[in-house]
Image (cartoon, helix red, strand yellow):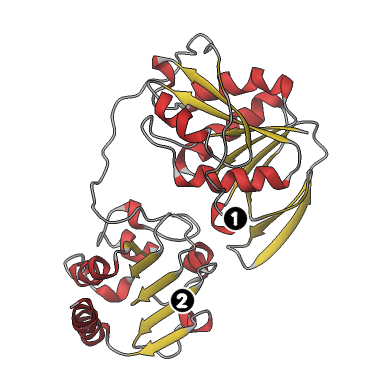
Amino acid sequence: MAILLVADHDNEALGAATAKALTAAGEMGGEVHVLVAGNGCRAVADEATRLTGAGKVILVEAPHLEHQLAEEVAALITPLMANYDAVVAASTNSGKNFMPRVAAMLDVAQISDITAVISSDTFERPIYAGNAMQTVQSGDVKKVVTVRTAGFQTAGDGGSAPIEEAAAPAPVGVSKFIGEELSQSDRPELTSAKIVISGGRGMQSGDNFAMLEKVADLLNAAVGASRAAVDAGYVPNEYQVGQTGKVVAPELYIAVGISGAIQHLAGMKDSKVIVAINKDEEAPIFQVADYGLVADLFEALPQLEAELAKAAG
């Protein structure tokens, strides 16, 4: 079985999700080739060659691939699939954008957000906001699979795969990149952070998220939020953790003022250790928490910050 893994990157560095998606692809069996498509992204390809389990890295560079527009990436991947049995990508914003188009062009059903590989054609994926797990078997000749990377280990970096350069197809030209607004932060990226502290509607305002940020800085943690907090305008959309936000599985997840709706739990329930702070002792979040503190967050957070500062010396 030959598998094509589409790398997640920003033309400068390989996304952390790629190494986890590689683990999933490897469990399907067969040789895995990593496709690095972009512009001026040779450094990304060099980084991909070191991934353990990568048999080859295919580098395709062209100006119209720089921003990985769905139409352009799909037009690149589809003809390549003549040589592959499956194409795999992480369930990132980029992967969710172009993979459905690839599936449509190949006239096959996409298998989305897998959390486990049972065999080369059988997978597990969450349904009903993560309240049930579904086992699906694909009868399609070509498999199109996106990976919920929180469920897979990161591939090692002891590989030495060769790089093969390939020509890009002519631009499709039906869409164009206009611009983007990216938030800048010195904190770890939300989906790859080892510690995440998230706030919910209980934070009461965006200004109060400064309390979480102070704790996050002491823990070198990322800051997240529930959909309720995002919808209320407390924080930007990129903070959202949950079924319609980002899926995280850090070593430590601290939920502050979050009731624990099933949509939020779907995005963080795979965290290794979950700590909940909420003044409502009946809050559903306590059902999944390893440690729960029934307290007013406006009293508990300053105390936590003081203790962490003391421990930091």
Q: Decide: is 62 above or below 8.
A: above
Say whether residue 90 is visible: yes
> Of discs 1 and 2, which sits in the foreground?
1
Residue drawn at x 48%, y 37% is: 8
Q: Residues within 10 Å of mark 1 (few under 14, many from 20)?
A: many
- Picture coordinates of residue 64, whole percent (x, y): 41, 17
The kind of secondary structure element at disc 2 is strand
Residue drawn at x 47%, y 79% is: 285
Residue drawn at x 50%, y 58% is: 243
User: On the image, numbered disc 1 is attached to which residue?
Assistant: 152
The kind of secondary structure element at disc 1 is loop
Q: Is residue 165 left or right of residue 230?
A: right
Residue 274 disc label: 2
- Picture coordinates of residue 293, whole percent (x, y): 37, 88
Q: Residues within 10 Å of mark 2 (few under 14, many from 20)?
A: many
Q: Is residue 264 left or right of residue 185?
A: right
Task: Say which amino acid is labelled 1.
Answer: Phe
Task: Say which amino acid is labelled 2.
Answer: Ile
